[in-house]
Image: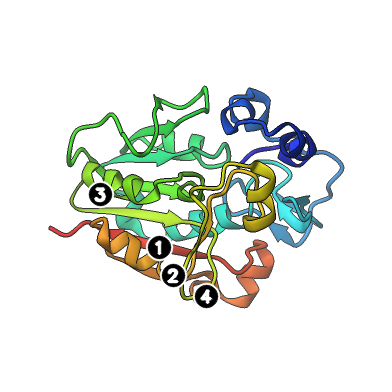
Amino acid sequence: MLQGLQGLLRGIERAGLDEGDVYRQERLYRAAPARGHRRGLLECPICGYSATRFRRFGLAGRRNAQCPRCGSLERHRFLWMYLTAHGRLLNRRLRVLHTAPEPCLEPRLRGRPNLRYRSIDRFNPFADLSADLTAIPLPDASVDLVISCHVLEHIPDHRAAMRELARVLRPGGQAIVMVPNDDRPVTEEGADVASPAERMRRFGHPYHYRNYGLDILDFLAEAGLPAHRVSSKRFLTGHKRRRFRINRNDLFHCCRPR
């Protein structure tokens, strides 16, 4: 999740900027400071900030999407509420691998004394491990919990990345995976599309290679990560979704077989 990507979009499409050219810019990882917001009925469950409105975010300018303090988006708030609702996910002594660590989540996970936390990213200069998810520099079965939110759609060979996530998980280890998805039966694939402008047209983002469908469960299972789908609409009441500004989102709770 990057700050200011929309302002770069025209240059990305016109100049065909490589993903690394954009994602290595340190300023994009820092949330803008909150200002001019009165306390109100909306609340961020991650940082506790409340306001009468949240910031717009996204290439389409979603209303009330971004927390003005920590920068969290709807998917991050759903993910955090799911993680904290399941004591076995964060309250035990666990080795955690966090892919493409979001600034709103990373300090809260790293600060938990029971977690041996490591982050991994290809471009983020602040990550613990600088590597591609298709070649994770960790031993087999060395991680208890993987957290991966909106990363796999950026990887041309996403099946290789899923296999690597399964490899580093211990038997019985768990992974919480989120991707842009809908109820189409088959994923719209574009791993061979080289143009950021064409990917923007097809997938709504210059650095996405696919729009996932229901077969995301098949991809995960084939990689060794059988999963069940958790919908924000079923997990949270309408009141909580409105209060915490959480839209229609899914996450996939995976477990590596013992």
Q: CA distance from mark 4 to mark 2?
A: 13 Å
Closer-to-camera residue (153/128): 153
The residue singled out by tag 4 in the image is 183
Looking at the image, is 22 positioned above or below residue 191? above
Please give the name of the residue rendered at 44% of the width and 70% of the height, measured from the top-left corner. Answer: 230
Q: Amino acid at mark 4?
A: Asp
Quarter occupied by the C terminus: bottom left
CB atoms at circles 4 and 2 under 8 Å apart?
Answer: no
Q: Which mark is residue 230?
A: 2
Query: Is tag 3's residue or tag 1's residue first in the polypeptide sequence?
Result: 3
Q: Position of residue 41 (x, y in %)?
A: 75, 62
Residue 200 relative to residue 159: left or right: right
Query: Is tag 4's residue or tag 1's residue first in the polypeptide sequence?
Result: 4
The quadrant where residue 2 appears? top right
Query: Is tag 3's residue or tag 2's residue first in the polypeptide sequence?
Result: 3
Q: Amino acid at mark 2?
A: Val
Callout 2 environment at 10 Å: few (<14), some (14 to 19), or many (20+)?
Answer: some
The residue singled out by tag 3 in the image is 166
Callout 4 environment at 10 Å: few (<14), some (14 to 19), or many (20+)?
Answer: few
The residue singled out by tag 1 in the image is 252
Q: Position of residue 162 (x, y in %)?
A: 33, 50
Q: Secondary structure at mark 4?
A: loop
Please give the name of the residue rendered at 69% of the width and 37% of the height, measured from the top-left corner. Answer: 3
